[in-house]
Amino acid sequence: MAEFRKKRKKICHMCAGKSVDYKDVPIISKYISDSGKILPRRFTGTCAKHQREVAKQVKLARFMGFIPFCK
């Protein structure tokens, strides 16, 4: 018989009080993959509202040249 573990729900960091800014490259890089793609909500643990904000900040950081479009 297989045991099923109860998954712990990931906490949205922005709901907890932290913010994402396009100028903070170390924070922005947590939300992009090695190939430069924006990670989905199921990997980052952000809520839908803040995932849209993360996507907006990542795209702005790409446009400003802080992070590359692809690696």
Image (cartoon, rainbow, N blue to C red):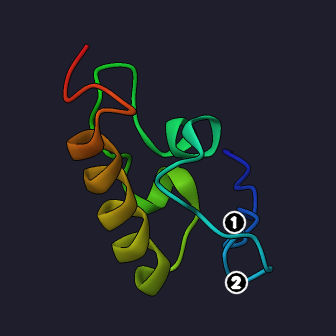
- 43 and 2: which is toward the camera: 43
Q: Secondary structure at mark 2?
A: loop
Q: Which residue corresponds to the image point at 58% horizontal and 63% vertical from the top-left?
A: 20
Q: Which residue corresponds to the image point at 75% horizontal and 56% vertical from the top-left?
A: 5
In front: mark 1 or mark 2? 2
> Residues under labels 1 and 2: Cα distance?
11 Å
The quadrant of the picture occupied by the C terminus is: top left
Image coordinates of residue 17 in percent, x first then y, are 79, 79
Q: Which residue corresponds to the image point at 54% horizontal and 60% vertical from the top-left?
A: 21
Counting residues from the start of the chain, the first of labels 1 and 2 encountered is: 1
Residue 59 is tagged as none
Left or right, 58 with respect to 21, comes to: left
Image coordinates of residue 32 in percent, x first then y, are 41, 38
Left or right, 58 with respect to 44, comes to: left
Q: Which amino acid does the dot numbered 1 rest on? A: Lys
Q: Does residue 43 lie above or below 8 as drawn?
A: above
The residue indicated by pointer 2 is 15
Residue neighbourhood size for the residue with mark 2, other residues' Cα within 10 Å, grouped as few (<14), some (14–19), many (≥20): few
Q: Does residue 15 lie above or below 21 as drawn?
A: below
Image coordinates of residue 45 in percent, x first then y, are 58, 63
The quadrant of the picture occupied by the N terminus is: top right
Q: Does residue 49 lie above or below 4 as drawn?
A: below
**Residue 57 occupies quadrant:** bottom left
**Residue 70 occupies quadrant:** top left
Residue neighbourhood size for the residue with mark 1, other residues' Cα within 10 Å, grouped as few (<14), some (14–19), many (≥20): few
* CB atoms of marks 1 and 2 within 8 Å: no
**Residue 6 occupies quadrant:** bottom right
Residue 10 is tagged as 1
